[in-house]
Image: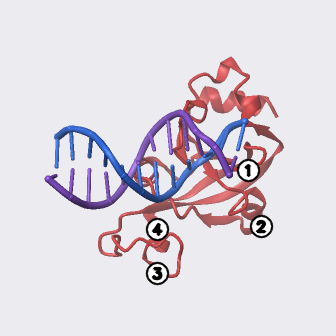
Chain colours: A red, B blue, C purple
Amino acid sequence: MAYWLLKSEPSTFGIDDLAAKQVDGWEGVRNYQARNMMRDQMRRGDQAFLYHSNCAEPAITGLMEIVREGYPDPTAHDPESKYYDPKSSPAQPRWFQVDVRYLRHLSRPITLRELRQHQALDGLLLLRRGNRLSVTPVEPAHWDYILTLE
DNA sequence: GCCAACGTTGGC
DNA sequence: GCCAACGTTGGC
């Protein structure tokens, strides 16, 4: 089983939204590297942190599980969607998503500022300078360590 | 294939 | 709102 970190802006879709929906498609990813990981590498049963980005307190806020492996992102083919991409088509889909299931909130948000203070987390892709990828793998040792911070 | 211009992300 | 870092686009 592998571990991941998925970013989302809480004003768009945060941990409370996922808790309400329980299962949701991780739609709208429009970056090829992130797409490739969702399409090719994520497996059912993998777990992921939900990270709140672009907000007052950027932080890991919850845990989720991959419940459906990569499949074409339907919002790419919906002209009404803000994620619409005319260069994608159902016959030749360009963008993929997975389905995630809510597991739980962390007992408290673990902020980016706090994560940066732990040498044990050196190498965590989230902390790399200039990193903007919304989907990144998390090493098991890092995963376990972060959960001890709760 | 190069690379300048432009757009986006996201912390601060 | 600023701006650094990065990705994408498109002319050549």
Asked if badge 2 and badge 3 are on a common chain, one would say yes
Within 10 Å of disc 2 (Cα), the crowding (few <14, some 14-19, many 20+) is few
| Residue beneath disc 4 | A73
Q: Earlier in the sequence, mark 4 or mark 3?
A: 4
Q: Nearer the viewer, residue A64 or A1?
A: A64
> Do tag 1 and tag 2 residues touch (Cβ < 8 Å)?
no
Q: Nearer the viewer, mark 4 or mark 3?
A: 3
Q: Nearer the viewer, residue C9 or A144?
A: C9
* Residue under numbered circle 1: A55
Q: Which mark is residue A20?
A: 2
Q: Label 3: few (<14), some or many (≥20) within 10 Å? A: few
Q: Say above or below: A129 vs A45.
A: above
Q: Are marks 4 and 1 on the same chain?
A: yes
Whether discs 4 and 2 lie on one chain: the answer is yes
Kindly indicate the quadrant of the structure image that contains residue A101.
bottom right
Residue A13 seen from this side: yes
Q: Is residue A144 above or below residue B6?
A: above
Which of the two labelled residues, at mark 4 and mark 2, occupies the earlier sequence position?
Answer: 2
Q: Are marks 4 and 3 on the same chain?
A: yes
